[in-house]
Amino acid sequence: MPKVTYAQPDGTETVLDLVPGTTVMRGAVTGGVRGIVAECGGNLMCATCHVYVDLDEATPAPFSPVTPDEDELLDCTATPREAGSRLSCQLGLTDRTADIVVRVPESQT
Amino acid sequence: MATTVGQPAEHDIGLSRLRHDPYPAYRYLREHDPVARVPEAGRYLVTRHADIMHVERHPEIFLSSENPSLMTRSIGETLLRQDGAAHQRLRRAAEPPLRPRVVKEHWLPVFRRNTADLLSVLAERGEGDLFADFAGPIAARNLAALLGLRGVGDEDMRQWSQAIIDAAGNYGEDPEIWARCARAVADLDAAMDEILPVLRRDPDPSVVSAMLHADDPLTEDEIRTNIRVFLGGGLNEPRDSIATATYALLTHDEQRRDVEAEPALWKRVFEEAVRWVSPIGMYPRRVATHTDLAGRVLEPGDKLGIVIASGNHDERVFDRPERFDIHRAETGHIAFGGGPHFCLGTWVSRAAVAQIALPGLFGALPGLRLTDEAVPFEGWVFRGPLRLGATWNS
Ligand code: FES
C-alpha cells in the first residue's frame, strides 16, 4: 500500500497507508489530516486541497501531469504556487505509487 | 422517523423567529440540539460546522434530490436537486464559463464596465439606497451577461428571480405565488427563444452557449430549466453579499480605513461578509440510508436543512463569530457549500464582488455614509439587508 506522509508547516507529520484507488486528498480527509479542506469534494472547482509535492530531478513523477483545469486553479491557491504545487484531489494512488511526502500549506482559503 | 429521546424539548423555534434573526436560535441549537427537529420547517436543522462538513463529504448518504420538492414543481428538475452522474453531466456543461481563467480573461472587463456604468449615474445623485440602486442592479446586469441573456433589463431580472425564489419557498401554497412564477418562467422562456438559435450558430463565453456546445450537450429543454435555477439563485447571492459587505464596512470605520489603505484586503472583506451573514443560509438534503449524525439516528427519507449560516457562526471554529472581522485568523467558512454541489458561482462572485463591485463603490462615492439608523436584515433561507440608505459627496 502506498504510504503518504503529510508534513504540516509546524513540522508535525502524519503518515498514512492508503488503499490504491484513493487520492491524496481523500486519504487526508478520511484520516483527519489538518489543512486539507477540499471544499468541492474533489470536483476540481475549489483549490482548497492544495499541497506541495517536492521531488528532485532524479525521481520519476509519481502522478499524472497537471491538466489545464488543474493548472488554472493552481493559480488561485491561498498560498503561493510553487513548482511542486498540486491539487491533492488529482493525485490518484495505485499499488505502484512509491511512498511520498507532501507538504500541507499554511492556509487553503 | 427519528425520535427526540434524550433531546431537550423546550425549544420552540418557529419560522417567523428565524426570518427575523436566526442567529440566537442557531446558537441555542448548536449547543443543545445540533440536529434539531423543527416541525415548522418540516426538517431536522443541522447547525454545527463539523456536522455540515460531514454531510457534504458524504453525498451518497445525504442526497440533494427531493421529490416532490417545491422547486421541482415550480421550475422543473434542475441540477440543484439531482445527484451522481445526472448532476455531474449538467454541471460539467454549465461550468466552463465559470472557471477562474475565463472569469479573469473574459468576465472581469464585463463586470468592470457594468459597475462603472451604474456608478457614474449614482455618483452625481449624492444619495440613494445602495441595495436597490446598486447591489441589486449590478448583480442583475452581471448575471444577464454571464448567462447570455440579451436585452433583458435589470428590473425584469429582479422580478423573475424573485418570483422563482418565492415559488421555491411557497410552503403556504399561495396561488398568487405560483401564478407569478409561471409568468416569470414564460417571460424567461421567451427571452431564451431569442438567444438559443443565435448562440447555437455563434458560440460565445456565456453559460447558455457552453450548455449548447458542451461535449455532451444539453437539450434545449434542459437548458431552459437550469437557467431558471441560475436566475433564482445567481442574483440574490451577489446582491446580498455586496449589501452586507457594504453595511459592514460602513459600520466598522477602522476596518474600512484598513481596506481603503490596503486594497488586497477586499478579498477578505468579501469572504468575511459571506461568513458573517451568509446569503444562502440553509439548503435541503435528504437522507438515503440509515445513519447517525451527531448522535441523532436518521432514517431514509428524513429531510434535513443544512444551515451553513449557523456553521459559519460555530464558536467551535470561529472566535467571537458574531463579530465582523476581516483580520480574523480562522478561515474555513462554508458559505459556498461543499461537495459536488459546491457553488458554481464561487469564482465569478469573487471577481464580480470582491475585485470590482466593492472597491468600485467605495472608490466612486467619496464620503459614503449610511443615513438609515437601523438597517433591516431579513431571512434565514436567504438573508441580507432590505435597504441601505446612504449619502455621499457628489
Ligand atoms: S477538492 Fe476541490 S479542487 Fe480538489
Image: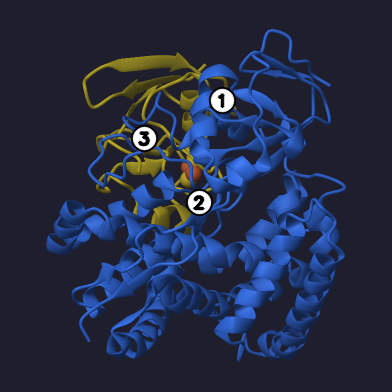
Chain colours: A yellow, B blue
* Amino acid bearing label 1: Leu
Labels 3, 1: one chain: yes
Chain identity of mark 1: B
Kindly identify which residue carries mark 3: B321
Compare residues B246 and B117 and report the one nearer the observer: B246
Chain identity of mark 3: B
Kindly identify which residue carries mark 2: A45
**Measured from the top left, where is residue B45 in percent x and y?**
65, 32
Could you say which quadrant of the image residue B10 lies in? Answer: top right
Compare residues B213 and B279 and report the one nearer the observer: B279
Kindly identify which residue carries mark 1: B29
Q: Residue at x 48, y 20 (%)?
A: A2
Mark 3: which secondary structure?
loop
Residue behind label 2 places its C-beta within 8 angstroms of ligand 1: yes
Relative to B392, residue B284 above or below: above
Residue furthest to the left in view is B261
Residue behind label 3 places its C-beta within 8 angstroms of ligand 1: no
**Quadrant housing the N terminus of chain B:** top right
Query: Within 10 angstroms of label 1, few (less than 14), some, or many (20 or more) residues?
Result: many
Tell me the distance, in whole angstroms, between the alpha carbons under discs 1 and 2.
32 Å
Mark 1: which secondary structure?
helix
Q: Residue at x 25, y 35 (%)?
A: A56
* Amino acid bearing label 2: Met
Q: Residue at x 16, y 52 (%)?
A: B254
**Measured from the top left, where is residue B111 in percent x and y?**
41, 77
Relative to A3, residue B353 above or below: below
**Quadrant housing the C terminus of chain B:** bottom left
* Amino acid bearing label 3: Pro
